[in-house]
Image (spheres, coloured by chain):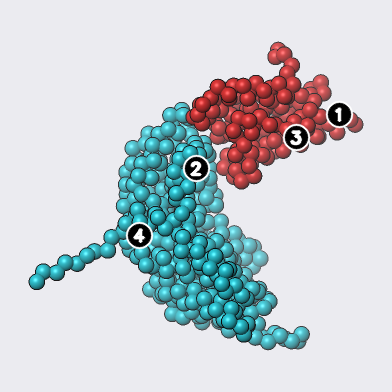
Chain colours: A cyan, B red
Amino acid sequence: METTTILPVFDVDTVRKSFPVLEREVNNQLLVYLDNAATSQKPQVVIDALSHYYSNYNANIHRGIHTLAEEATAAYEATRDTVRDFINATSSDEIIFTRGTTEGINLVAYTWGRKNIHEGDEIIISTMEHHSNIVPWQILCEEKKAVLKVIPINDEGELLMDEYEKLLSPKTKLVSVTHVSNALGTVNPVKEIIAAAHNAGALVLVDGAQSSVHLDIDVQEMDCDFFAFSGHKVYGPTGVGILYGKKHILEEMPVFMGGGEMIKEVTFAKTTYNTLPYKYEAGTPNIADTIVLKTALDFVTELGKDLIRNHENKLLEYATGQMQSVPGLRIIGNAKNKVSLISFIIKNIHHQDIAVLLDNQGIAVRTGHHCTEPLMNRFGISGTARASFALYNTKEEVDRLIKGLYKCIKMLS
Amino acid sequence: MNEYKTIKEREEEIIDEFSLFDSWEEKYEYIIDIGKKLEPLEDKYKIGENIIKGCQSTVWLTSEFKDGKVFFKADSDAVIVKGLVSMLIKVLSGHEPDKILEAKLDFIREIGMMTHLAQTRSNGLLAMVKQIKNYALAYKSVDAA
């Protein structure tokens, strides 16, 4: 008997129906939302889960002996387990809830950094870092008289790995690099970066703000020491993020903020601290958004990250081809390995003018330096326009963007 | 020499011109056009202290106090912003500090460009209006002294 296997398909029309905002009109036209690298839109299940929490089991977590507190605590901890699986961490104790990627990076800088970075030590970052992965290390280096070194890139927007290896030395204590560039889309070879850093005796923090929504994250396989990302870029709510750290490193690290939840025992003479992960979660956390982050991650996992990626990569390929035909348009960031994001400039046209005229056509893109000023300086530009694609974007929307760009050029030249 | 018109009269002129436009395209084409026609600011004025830095584009604004009136000149690297600045200057330049400080600038709303004045638009238009009024305030105190 013949058997047929039905391959899973990614039906973008059905997926779109899960996102109510996509039905919205902006300036009398159906919204085309291409600012996903800044934040993603939220599916109805996420919106409903927030309302459900507040309507049914809003309570402060961990210390309550009543039903609501127990339900809220269970849901909160369920998110921790889901995140553990989402990034394949060994233990839920390695998952620390933060406000977002920026707080995660700062947490490491202020705790691990202050304890372990000394005068003359070196921290390596890259040219394509977001300001959030530059400034915390600058502050630390200034305080400790340590040295910040920067991995250069080529004109395509790829890290120069030979140069990176030359920067590594016994003085290197930390390498902190982005997994995916928010301004170029470049996917960095983090596994290679981490292996080389470990050989030199340095730890590695990976900024996963842009990668966690597109790529499969496996912190064990990557072997990173820290991994930080934000919920709102993975279809979850704003105000909740994750810092992953290897357990033995987190255990050795000094505490960050003092307050409730992070303590074991307090006397005026001495306070002892709670175990992981609570040691780093002082005060009442963002309970609602943390609980709902699970809904968002489950949504992505159920759709299938590989199917999503396949869809997004097709969009990237199509959009890249279409954009290359637009006169005067130059794509900034042409790495071989990219996520579905295109940064571009158009000859003799300011990126802000492009954004204003696209907005009038209902198309949302981001423009400016994307919080990567040193990177813009590397390319000798003041900023770019950036179209970033998510699982709900379509080929038709790419066409609207291209048509919109032709209109911009016509009106502006 | 242009004949003297009050701020309100100049606002009315702009509103009248915009009333001829049916679509957003026509409005923006007009703004782009006056942006392009705005006399470029001489390089000596394109200095740090004249920059009103929005997140996205750079705007330079300089002023001069002559016969009790304030005159403004400006430039921007983005043409739509330049057109908007050009309109602001057309309305506000050449008046006494008090008149500038009193100006409500209702024409921005009337011509449907209010979004550009919103705090959330980091294009510097709001900062520009503030800076123009700051100049007026400064000259007013100089004049009174």
**Disc 4 and disc 1: Cα gap in Å?**
66 Å
Q: Where is residue A132 shown, x and y percent of the image?
A: 56, 59
Depth check: give the residue in front, B24 or B72: B24
Label 3 Cα crowd, 10 Å radius (few <14 / some 14-19 / many 20+): many
Mark 2 vs 4, N-terminal side = 2
**Disc 2 and disc 1: Cα gap in Å?**
48 Å
Residue under label 4: A308
Identified at 43% across, 29% down, the residue is A410
Q: Amino acid at mark 3?
A: Lys
Determine the secondary structure under disc 1: helix
Label 4 chain ID: A
Residue under label 2: A26
* Labels 2 and 3 in the same subunit: no
Q: Where is residue B95 shown, x and y percent of the image?
A: 76, 24
Identified at 68% across, 76% down, the residue is A258
Q: Which mark is residue B133?
A: 3
Q: Amino acid at mark 4?
A: Ile
Residue under label 1: B143
Where, by quadrant of the figure, is residue B97 drawn? top right
